[in-house]
Image: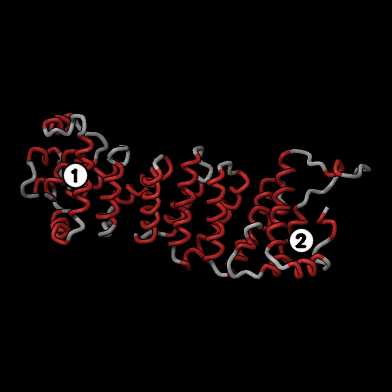
Amino acid sequence: VVLGAATVVVVVLGAAAQQQLSGRLQRMANARGLGVPGGTEIIGVCTKTLATLLRKRVSSDWFNKVHDKQLTEIQDVDRTIAKSALKTTFLEALVGQIHASLDHEVLRPSSLLLLSRVLLHQKVEMPAVYDCIERVGEVLIRGGDTNTSKRCAQIYTEFMIDYPHEDKALQNKLTFLVRNLGFNEEGGRRSVINALYMVVMQFPLDLLSKRFGALIFVPVAARLPQESDGQARKMLEALLLALMERVDKNVRNQLLSVVMKWKTSDKPLLKIALADLLALVPKIEGEKPSERFQEFVPVLRELLPEDEQTEEIGPAAHKPKDAVHWRLVYSIMRSFEKFSSSISPNDLDRLSTSSTLEAKFFW
C-alpha cells in the first residue's frame, strides 16, 4: 500500500522535482486515470494515505531505507516511469511533489500533511526542504483558506524552532512575516499576525528576549493605527500583550523604551501608535497599575497636540484640526481611561492631586 501510494504521489506527479508534468508523464498519468476529472483528488487521497502510513513504524523503516535511493533502484517501482525521473532519488522526488502541490488548491492540504507529519517529523534535512518552507510562507499569506493558513503558520514556526538556522536566516524568516503586516488582503494580514503570535508563544524565551522581541514588537506596535480590519486590530493587540507578558519586566521596559521615542516624532501615526500601545499596559499581568500610571500618564500629556494661540473660549477653541488630530486626541484619552480604570478611586484621587498629573490634562 505504501509503495502504491508513493508511486502515484512521487513518480507520476513529482518526478524530477518539476512543477509541471512532462508530456510523457502526463500521458502516463492519463493512462492510470490521473488525468481524468477527479485525478487530482486521487493524488490527494494517495498523499494523505502515504502521510498516514509513513507514521507507522514498519512503513517508516521502509521509508528510511529507500529515501536516498534512486527511483530506478527501488524494487517493484514501474521502471518506465522511474527512468523518466533520471537520477532523482525517492526523497528528492517526494519533496519536489510537495513543492509543486503547494501551488494546487486541491492538493495543498494533503501535501502540507505529508510535509509536517513525515519529512519535518523525521527531521529530514536537505536544501529542497528549506525551499519548501519558503513556499509555505507564501501560501500562509496568499492561501486564502483559514485552515490552510493556520497549518502553514504552525509548520513555518515549528521549522524555525526545530531545524538548524543561522541567526541571519531566522531573522530573514521573521522579517518576511513582519513586512507582510500591511498585506493588501485582510485575510493575509490575519494569517501573518497569527504566525507571529505562534512565534511569540513557542520560541525559546531566551531567543525571544535577547534577539527577536524588538524585531516583532516595534513594527507590530506601529501597525496599530494603520489597521482597518477590526479583527486584525484585536489580533495585533493580543500579540503585543502576549509578547509583553512573556518576557520579564526588564526586557518589557527595554521594548517600551524603544517606542517612547515616538512621542517626539514628526509622524502623527507613530504618536497615535504609542498612545494605543500604552492603553495595553494596564492589562499586563503582574504589573502594578499605580506605578505605571505615574510613569506613563505624563507621557500621554506630552502627546497632546499643542493648542494654537487663540482668544476663543469654550469647545470651539479645542476643535480638532483634522482626522489625524482627532484620532490622536481620541487615542490619548482612551489610553488615559484604561489607566484610570485600572486603579482604585482612592489611588486615582491621590495621584490626580499630585504633581504627576496636571489639571490641564483634564481639559
The residue under label 2 is 298
Q: What is the quadrant of residue 144 in the picture?
A: top left
Q: Where 164 falls versus 317 (above or below)?
A: below
| Residue 38 left/right relative to 167 | left
Categorize mark 2 by other alpha carbons within 10 Å: few (<14), some (14-19), many (20+).
some
Q: Describe the element under mark 1 as helix, strand or loop.
A: helix
Picture quadrant of residue 347: bottom right
Q: Residue at x 81, y 55 (%)?
A: 362
Measured as percent of width and height from the top left, residue 16 is found at 20, 41
Q: Locate residue 10, reporting x and y percent.
A: 18, 44
277, above or below 186, in the image: below
Disc 2 residue type (three-letter): Pro
Using residue 60 as the reference point, say whether residue 332 is left or right of it. Answer: right
Name which residue lies at 11% across and 38% down.
81
Instruction: Using the image, tell me which numbered label, if any, was put on residue 46.
Output: 1
Residue 72: give x, y in percent of width and height: 9, 45
Question: What separation in Å lies between label 2 and label 1 (alpha carbons)?
Answer: 63 Å
The colour scheme is secondary structure
Kindly state the secondary structure of the residue where label 2 is placed: helix
Camera-nearest residue between 300 and 204: 300
At label 1, the amino acid type is: Cys
Mark yes or no: residue 138 visible.
no
| Residue 35 seen | yes
- How many residues crowd mark 1 within 10 Å: few (<14), some (14–19), many (20+)? many
